[in-house]
Image (cartoon, rainbow, N blue to C red):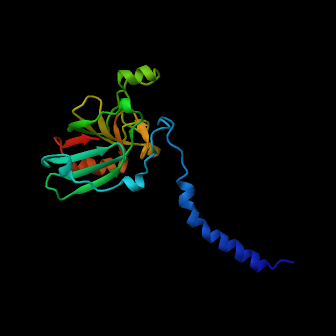
Amino acid sequence: MTDPRLSRRGFLAAAGTLPLFAPTLLRAETPDAQVEASEPVRRNISSFQAMNWQDHFESLGTGAIVADTVSRALHYWSGDGQTYKLYPTSVPRTEDLTKRGYTKVVRKKVGPSWTPTPSMHERFPDLPRVMGPGPDNPLGSHALYLSWPAYLIHGTHDTRKIGRRSSDGCIGLYNEKIAELFALVPVGTQVRLL
């Protein structure tokens, strides 16, 4: 007959090793369906690294934002250089939806309305013409409008989108993070999308 304490000890010892293997199991995820199989999957854990604003702008001006679509992170520096913030983001689901280059924040809105673009209506004919603020609005609680038409940095009510290729061109943040960023960013803040 087996000693029950031995079996119990063996079970507890085996269970104690599970945390050693959990990171390996968690890394066994598959790439998003929209990403081509040839594209390497990038892990946010190693990509979330501080940046220097000097690598992207000549001066801070009223502030600066770099949205990195590869690491899926947004970097913000205040105009006086005293504040630096790093936020996880959602990014465009495909390369043809991704715009890169320099722009700036031209308008800010709490409780933005969403107007799907003509190309969105072509792909999804059942979309509404306009959707007001609320829990179904994909722009979340706050929006920073860029000088490029139809491109925004905004919140999202769907927290599963953050860290993924899930947008139609915009950069998305958790609602609590866009609210924080919204309070920091003045109109005129320079933006670079990588």
Return the x and y of residue 82 as percentages of the image width and height: 17, 59
**What residue is shown at x 71% (from left), y 74% (from top)?**
10
**What residue is shown at x 57% (from left), y 56% (from top)?**
25
In the rendered image, the vertical position of residue 50 relative to residue 14, given as above or below: above
Return the x and y of residue 157 as percentages of the image width and height: 42, 43
Instruction: Say which of 149 and 186 sits in front.
Output: 149
Instruction: Say which of 3 and 31 sits in front.
Output: 31
**What residue is shown at x 44% (from left), y 36% (from top)?**
136
Determine whether, in the image, residue 174 is placed left or right of residue 107. Answer: right
In the rendered image, the vertical position of residue 22 relative to residue 151, given as above or below: below
Based on the displayed image, in which of its 4 quarters is residue 83 positioned? bottom left
Determine whether, in the image, residue 187 is placed left or right of residue 161. Answer: left
Q: Quadrant of the N terminus?
A: bottom right
Q: Residue furthest front?
A: 38
In the rendered image, the vertical position of residue 118 relative to residue 169, given as above or below: above
Return the x and y of residue 5 as percentages of the image width and height: 75, 80
Q: Quadrant of the C terminus?
A: top left
